[in-house]
């Protein structure tokens, strides 16, 4: 007896694709998942360094945090989780300041002793300028914390990260890390902050561990579709770059990528926090991530692993570039994608929607799409 043909095709074995695959498989559908890489979990992929016992993220730091009870309950079913609250520091001269900017950072940078939110607001009010219509990242920072902190922390970092002046970037980029008027040094303030024991590849592996799911890695969808009839599938979910799906019909959307330089150092820790940003143009990289902070080994060892991140236009597409030129192109691709929905073809995830979304958002949107398409 032959097994039934897959009725659901999913391109991409990251969190968006894995969530939909699991949901449809659990509902009884036959699911085929394709991914061009030799591993699961997309950019969340990590591995255990055998020489040190340190879990290393191959594509930069990926840290799970969410306020969604639905998402938290969902991911709990596939892995055990260990609490982890991320801290980020920024090197300004010889100082290490907290990010996002908070009361502690302002006191240290300006050499003052502000005691509360009211004093901090009053202090910064003298350094900022009113901007009627905040449109760019530059507008936002200047209107909230002023020129001195803008030039010290954000101006050059933005130019290195995005290869654009902050005046060319949407304010939404900087608003991902809003100014805090308290002493909370955590990078995120979400209710749930944790990492999956065994890493993100193990998490996705458990999500896809279902008898109704067929997984094909090292399979490029664009080559594969020249040899297969897509009409055999009831629904197709695509999580790759939306402009590539349409063969760049309206032009290329811009993505920033990263070149990771990994280093091992024979010392217990390299830096004080999981991530330290380097805004100065004296450094060609934007930040250093030390993975030992995320998953500390069970035994104390005099070794650690870091990665230096060098932004580039080449390589895997990581960051959609939020500026006017790309918004205009995206609207055209969105209209083209909308026309495919009656045929059962849908786009999701960071690349499929060309949006700078977090991991919990990717899962939440996949869950919502499944619910929407399967209402009785």
Image (tube, rainbow, N blue to C red):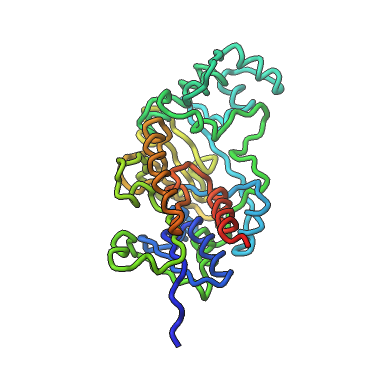
**The residue positioned farthest toward the bottom in the image shown:** 1
Please determine whether, in this image, residue 210 is positioned above or below residue 23: below
Rendered residue at 54%/38% (across/down): 88
Q: What residue is at 47 percent from the left and 22 percent from the top?
A: 138
Q: Residue at x 36, y 39 (%)?
A: 311
Q: 370 or 13, which is in the foreground?
A: 370
The answer, for residue 265, to whether it is visible in the render is no
Residue 361 percent across, percent down from the top left: 56, 48
Location of the N terminus (image quadrant):
bottom left
- Position of 143 with respect to 308 (left or right) is right
Viewer-proximal residue among 171 and 85: 171
Of the pair 105 and 257, the residue shown nearer to us: 257
Residue 155: x and y in percent read 43, 24
Res. 186 visible in picture: yes
Quadrant where the C terminus is found in the figure: bottom right
252 over 339 or under it: above or below: above
The location of residue 293, given as percent across then percent down, is 55, 48
The vertical placement of 249 against 341, above or below, is above
Find residue 313 and report its image quarter.
top left
Q: Nearer the viewer, residue 30 or 108?
A: 30
Examine the image and state in which quarter residue 144 appears.
Answer: top right
Q: Residue at x 50, y 55 (%)?
A: 16
Residue 221's x, y, as percent? Answer: 34, 61
Tally of numbered discs: 0
């Amino acid at each position: 007896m032959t097994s039934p043909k897959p009725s659901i095709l999913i391109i991409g074995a990251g969190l968006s694709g894995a969530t939909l695959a699991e949901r449809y498989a659990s509902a009884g559908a036959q699911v085929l998942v394709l991914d061009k890489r030799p591993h699961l979990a997309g950019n969340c992929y990590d591995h255990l360094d055998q020489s040190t016992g340190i879990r290393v993220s191959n594509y930069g730091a990926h840290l799970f945090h969410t306020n969604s009870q639905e998402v938290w309950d969902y991911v709990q079913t596939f892995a055990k989780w260990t609490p982890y609250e991320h801290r980020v520091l920024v090197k300004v001269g010889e100082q290490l300041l907290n990010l996002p900017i908070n009361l502690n950072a302002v006191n240290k940078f300006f050499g003052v002793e502000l005691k509360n939110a009211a004093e901090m607001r009053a202090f910064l009010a003298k350094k900022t300028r009113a901007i009627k219509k905040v449109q760019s990242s530059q507008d936002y920072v200047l209107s909230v914390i002023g020129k001195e902190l803008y030039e010290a922390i954000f101006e050059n970092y933005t130019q290195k990260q995005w290869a654009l002046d902050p005046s060319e970037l949407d304010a939404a980029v900087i608003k991902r890390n809003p100014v805090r008027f308290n002493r909370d040094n955590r990078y995120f303030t979400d209710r749930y902050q944790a990492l999956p024991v065994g890493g993100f590849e193990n998490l996705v592996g458990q999500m896809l561990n279902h008898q109704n799911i067929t997984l094909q890695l090292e399979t490029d969808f664009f080559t594969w579709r020249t040899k297969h009839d897509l009409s055999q599938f009831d629904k197709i979910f695509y999580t790759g770059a939306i402009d590539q799906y349409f063969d760049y019909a309206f032009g290329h959307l811009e993505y920033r990528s990263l070149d990771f330089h990994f280093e091992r150092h024979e010392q217990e820790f390299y830096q004080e926090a999981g991530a330290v940003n380097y805004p100065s143009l004296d450094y060609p990289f934007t930040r250093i991530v030390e993975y030992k902070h995320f998953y500390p080994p069970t035994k104390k060892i005099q070794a650690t692993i870091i990665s230096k991140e060098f932004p580039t236009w080449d390589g895997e597409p990581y960051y959609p570039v939020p500026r006017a030129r790309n918004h205009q192109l995206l609207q055209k691709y969105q209209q083209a994608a909308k026309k495919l929905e009656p045929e059962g073809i849908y786009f999701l995830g960071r690349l499929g929607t060309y949006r700078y979304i977090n991991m919990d958002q990717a899962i939440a949107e996949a869950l919502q799409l499944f619910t929407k398409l399967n209402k009785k």
